């Protein structure tokens, strides 16, 4: 009897080649309009919260947190206290904890590089960039420039997009007027499509969504983010592994 084998794409060592720069940029091109609208909306929000343009640009350059920046600025207190700072820290940590898991999933790829190349690359991890890189990796790609090249483009666009949003804050005071408020839910809904692995693996998605909506209706503030994330993680952890395919259970073909 023989056991079916599959190419071990996920553990191919990483390398650097300029040939993957443009493919990496092409892969994230569909995400650029949403990133632009998202960044403009954030710039407008900062203007409404009386941040200066310099403060906004410094935040955009050094934080690069996306949704967590929205959450932090939306709940920014009029006076910073130890309790308010702790609350902001908890909120942003909860929203951004997914980046730790995404970075860990890239370790079999980028972990083959020297630390001074792999760790700085993880600063570019975003939802869309990670998704594009994961597809590329699963199809046998190992060139690190695919991920880093696309990540740099997303970072630059995110950094620059807040400027027109800040300057046009008056026109963007009502995001619903231009549909900007739909950017985030539409983006994450689109991410679920390629991540679909059957209804069984979607159970944690449903649990997380239901719990988050219930907490949003019942508890004021941003606790629904924490509740949704924790409930989804717990439900996923309690699930058994998928049963092996029939040919594996039978020992393979003779």
Image (tube, grey):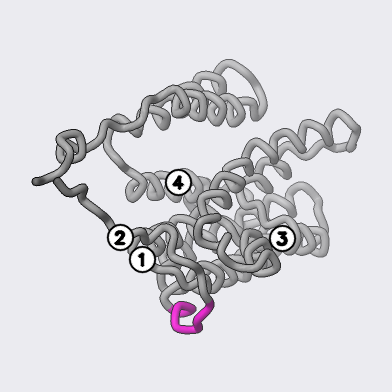
Q: Is residue 111 visible?
A: yes
Disc 3 secondary structure class: helix
Magenta range? 16-22
Residues at discs 4 and 2 in contact (Cβ within 8 Å): no
**4 vs 2, front mark:** 2
**3 vs 2, front mark:** 2
Measured along the vertical axis of the image, is residue 15 above or below residue 137?
Answer: below
- Going from N to C along the chain, the mark reached first, 2 or 1, is 2
Query: Residue beneath label 4, please?
Result: 188
- Going from N to C along the chain, the mark reached first, 4 or 2, is 2
Q: CA distance from mark 4 to mark 1?
A: 25 Å
Residue 66 percent across, percent down from the top left: 62, 52
Query: Residue beneath label 2, please?
Result: 7
Q: CA distance from mark 3 to mark 1?
A: 33 Å
Residue 42 percent across, percent down from the top left: 65, 53
Residue 167 percent across, percent down from the top left: 70, 64
- Going from N to C along the chain, the mark reached first, 3 or 2, is 2
Residues at discs 2 and 1 in contact (Cβ within 8 Å): yes
Disc 4 secondary structure class: helix
Q: CA distance from mark 3 to mark 2?
A: 40 Å
- Going from N to C along the chain, the mark reached first, 4 or 1, is 1
Query: Residue beneath label 3, please?
Result: 60
- Going from N to C along the chain, the mark reached first, 3 or 1, is 3
What residue appears at the point 50 percent right and 81 percent down from the top-left corner? 17
- Going from N to C along the chain, the mark reached first, 3 or 4, is 3
């Amino acid at each position: 009897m023989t056991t079916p084998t599959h190419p071990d794409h996920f553990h191919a060592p990483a390398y650097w080649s300029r040939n993957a720069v443009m493919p990496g940029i092409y892969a994230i091109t569909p995400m650029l309009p949403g990133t632009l609208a998202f960044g403009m909306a954030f710039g407008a929000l900062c203007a409404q919260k009386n941040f200066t343009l310099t403060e906004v640009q410094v935040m955009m350059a050094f934080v690069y947190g996306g949704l967590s920046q929205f959450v932090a600025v939306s709940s920014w207190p009029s006076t910073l206290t130890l309790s308010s700072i702790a609350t902001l820290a908890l909120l942003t940590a909860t929203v951004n904890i997914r980046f730790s898991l995404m970075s860990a999933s890239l370790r079999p790829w980028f972990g083959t590089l020297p630390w001074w190349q792999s760790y700085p690359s993880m600063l570019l991890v975003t939802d869309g960039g990670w998704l594009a890189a994961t597809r590329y990796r699963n199809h046998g790609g190992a060139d690190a420039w695919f991920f880093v090249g696309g990540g740099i483009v997303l970072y630059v666009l995110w950094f620059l997009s807040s400027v027109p949003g800040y300057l046009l804050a008056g026109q963007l005071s009502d995001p619903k007027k231009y549909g900007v408020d739909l950017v985030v839910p539409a983006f994450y809904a689109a991410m679920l499509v390629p991540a679909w692995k059957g209804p069984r693996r979607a159970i944690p998605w449903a649990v997380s969504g239901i719990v988050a909506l219930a907490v949003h209706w019942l508890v004021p503030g941003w606790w629904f983010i924490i509740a949704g994330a924790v409930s989804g993680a717990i439900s996923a952890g309690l699930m058994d592994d998928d049963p092996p395919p029939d040919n594996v259970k039978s020992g393979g073909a003779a």
